[in-house]
Amino acid sequence: MEYIGETSVEQRPKWSWWDLFLVILILVVTLAFVALFRNSIRSLVLASGIEREHLQTVLLFITTFLQASIITSSVLIITRRKGATLIDLGLKTDKLLKNIFSGLYGGFAVGIFVWGIGIIIALLTGPPPPQDVEKMFTGIKTAADLLLPFIAVVILAPVSEELYFRAMVYPVLRKSFGRLWAILLSGIFFGVVHFDLFRLVPIAAGGAVLAHLYEKHDSLIVPIIAHATWNFMMLSGYYFVVV
């Protein structure tokens, strides 16, 4: 893929609604197929010497790794087949340092914002059931045990999800509905696809802010760093509370 050229969010996308659906279809079909071998994978993990108390953490990491790999590879393959470049995905290296800092403080703001919404909802409806990321803390005793959760939550999830939700979904929605509705709808879609009814509103709100950051800075680097920062704050919070 070429790294030259210049496109802005409004000049994108080169992909279609079908392409957005295709990524989800590939993900669902592949994960459904892998689920057929859940018991075999569980046995292989235990046979590798992993302690049973760490089993759930490892299995959730494998699921996250597969999901991120499928999403990332599907997006990149579709991008290449459409004759697009990494720049069409918003992966631009200009203003890199500025975009990294924008992502850091943007992610901090997203984390506080989402936490605030979550606290209000919890006060009104009661505490929600644990997320999968909380289940990854099973058997964790030291900071070193956080390696797999850190890779899954702070690296794999932000990169793959931003490639799809912000780089692919948002420009398609923007072209069809305009900037404001695209930000709102992409956030709602982001929340719905997480399949967590109890956290739908805060996740959707966070997704909308990430879309706004993508629009504002015209660089996918910003929402990737912001998403990673948000998740790191969440991971740190769980560690200090659970461990």
Image: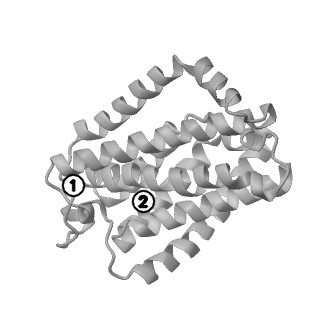
Which residue, given by chain and number where applicable, does mark 1 sit on? 13
Asked whether the viewer can see residue 235, the reply is yes
Q: Looking at the image, how many numbered discs can be counted on the residues? A: 2
* Residue type (three-letter) at the residue carrying disc 1: Pro
Q: Amino acid at mark 2?
A: Ala
Instruction: From the viewer's perspective, tell me whether residue 200 is left or right of residue 17.
Output: right
Position of 162 with respect to 18 (left or right) is right
**Neighbours of disc 2 within 10 Å: few (<14), some (14-19), many (20+):** many
Q: Nearer the viewer, residue 152 or 187?
A: 152
The structure residue drawn at horizontal position 18% and vertical position 56%, both measured from the top left corner, is 84
Instruction: Give the residue displayed 38% in from the left and 72% down from the top.
Output: 216
Is residue 181 visible in the rendered structure shown here? Answer: no
Q: 217 above or below 227?
A: below
The image position of residue 113, as x and y in percent, is: 64, 62
Query: Horizontal and vertical percent for residue 114?
Result: 64, 57
Relative to the observer, which residue lies in front, 38 or 242? 38
* The N terminus - image quarter: bottom left
Residue at the image point whose x is 59% and y is 49% from the top: 152
| Secondary structure at numbered mark 1 | loop
Q: Are marks 2 and 1 in contact (CB under 8 Å)?
A: no
Element assignment for label 2: helix
Tell which of 214 and 37 is nearer to you.
37
- Which of the 4 image quarters holds residue 16? top left
Residue 97 position (above or below residue 243) = below
Q: For the view shown, which residue lies furthest in the left direction? A: 83
Please indicate whether residue 23 sits to the left or right of residue 124 in the image.
left
Earlier in the chain: of badge 2 and badge 1, it is 1
Residue nearest the viewer, comparing 243 with 167:
243
State which mark lies toward you, 2 or 1: 1
Residue at the location (54% across, 57% down)? 155
* Circle 2 residue: 211
